[in-house]
Image: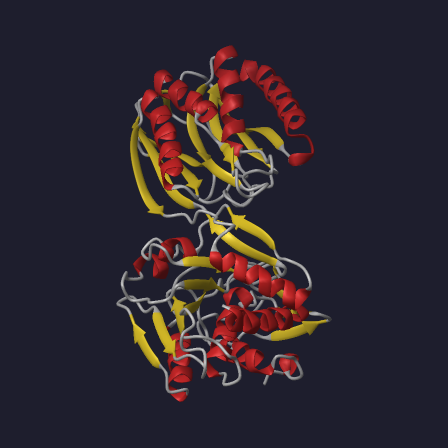
Amino acid sequence: MTPALADLEPKELWKHFDALAAIPRASTKEAAARDYVLAVAARSGLEAVQDEVGNTVVRKPAHAGREAAPMALLQGHLDMVCEKNEGTPHNFDTDPIKLRRDGDWLKADGTTLGADNGVGVAAALAVMESSDIAHGPLEFVFTIDEETGLTGAAEFPAGLLKSKYFLNLDNEEKGTICIGCSGGLKTTARRQVAFRPAAGDAAWRIKVFGLKGGHSGVDIHQGRGNALRILGSVLQTALDSLPIEIAELNGGSAQNAIPREASAVVVLDAARQKELQALVAKSEAEQRADLGGFDSELQITVEKVLRPEKVLDATDAKQTVNLLVSVPHGVLAMSPDVPGLVQNSTNLATAAIKGDTVEIVTSQRSAIESSKQAAARMVATAFRLAGFEVEQSGGYPGWKPEPNSEIVRKLQTVHEEVFGEPAKLIAMHAGLECGVIGEKYPGMQMASFGPTIVDPHSPNERVEISSVAGFWRYLKAALEGI
């Protein structure tokens, strides 16, 4: 075993994590990890099946005397996010993850660790091999390509699973049980635009930057600035007071991120440069005052650039800018069931002029399907009122929190027995595999728990070693108690 793990408990879990860390398993490249799972199942004499995309299901009979217990499943994803620090000589297609210990934390050397979801998968494998856990009949589900779009879960077939309880092992905070997540939908707007020769004799780039950004679900309630919304406000003010012409517009980086940066190139006579600079400075001061401590590093700058030959038609420019200012963005409703949880939201994500088309991408989230669709209709209506065509795609279901479900009550009882207090019930305003697979199995009761993992998806990823031991004790007790 790797020296960093040599004396850690529980050994039965860490040995599988050690093996997984040595197996390259980027999203869509999980074949070797899947082979490892199948080898463990074969050594244990367990039934294993695969679906058409590579998800794997293993079944294990009940421990003697627990045959009448309801069937439960343990689920985790095989892939990991592959990120490394600049200058780290690591090839994620061939090299093992280099593990190192720092006190009570396990880290990697300059790369992501793969604790997300390697610890959960290792725990499931340890249960597969166990002979001393008095569990009922079990299913184990190992999915592929979770990190780049929940693909494995989306393609998982209906009718394959038999379990009453679905235990996802991909939660990342000890002492909590996740009982819900949001579904999502992408709403894209496009408008074909016209161009005309630029009239002004100079050009400037107005740039919005310095914002925190963040995840469009998890961070949507943090009050952070949206660079596209701010840029739209600056441009709207400029169009109302100066004869500017808009030549370029671009902002945002991804559908699931709050945009941190955005910019536009505007054309205006050089004689009016100071007016433009004063307008932008005033807008920056107003926006910074509005954001306050939520996003205190905002900057809006003006820099001279080469004058473009063409600019947007005035009507197209105004409609686009007005839309950036008015299309809904942010929290739409809070959950009535889980304190502090966002129930419905929408994110103004990206905008760009591509050839003769303006394209704006947004995403809507809710744990309730009808609410998600209502939010998407609201955004689509705003787009259509501005003369944009609308396309909706990439939808996936949510998982409505059920804090009084049978599985949650059972897990809470076990948590109090193991730790002396109930777990905190949480829900995620983001997509989880539970929601996607669970939609295909009506009536299956779901919950998610795990050890403490900090900064997943980055080279700072680390797992709290002591929390893994607690997670293992809890998992064993839960399987014996349900």
Number of dots carrying numbers = 0
Which corner quadrant of the image does residue 470 belong to?
Answer: bottom right
- Up/down of 466 relative to 250, above or below: below
Q: Position of residue 130 (x, y in %)?
A: 50, 83
- Up/down of 404 relative to 364, above or below: below
Closest to the observer, 376 or 426: 426
Q: Position of residue 188 (x, y in %)?
A: 34, 36
Which corner quadrant of the image does residue 184 belong to?
Answer: top left
Q: Is residue 43 visible?
A: yes
Which residue ends up furthest to the top in the rendered image? 241
Closest to the observer, 270 or 445: 445
User: Residue at horizontal 60%, vertical 21%?
Assistant: 283
Query: In which quadrant is the N terminus drawn?
Result: bottom right
Q: Is residue 196 visible?
A: no
- Up/down of 203 relative to 213, above or below: above
Closest to the observer, 322 or 208: 322
Q: Position of residue 352 (x, y in %)?
A: 40, 34
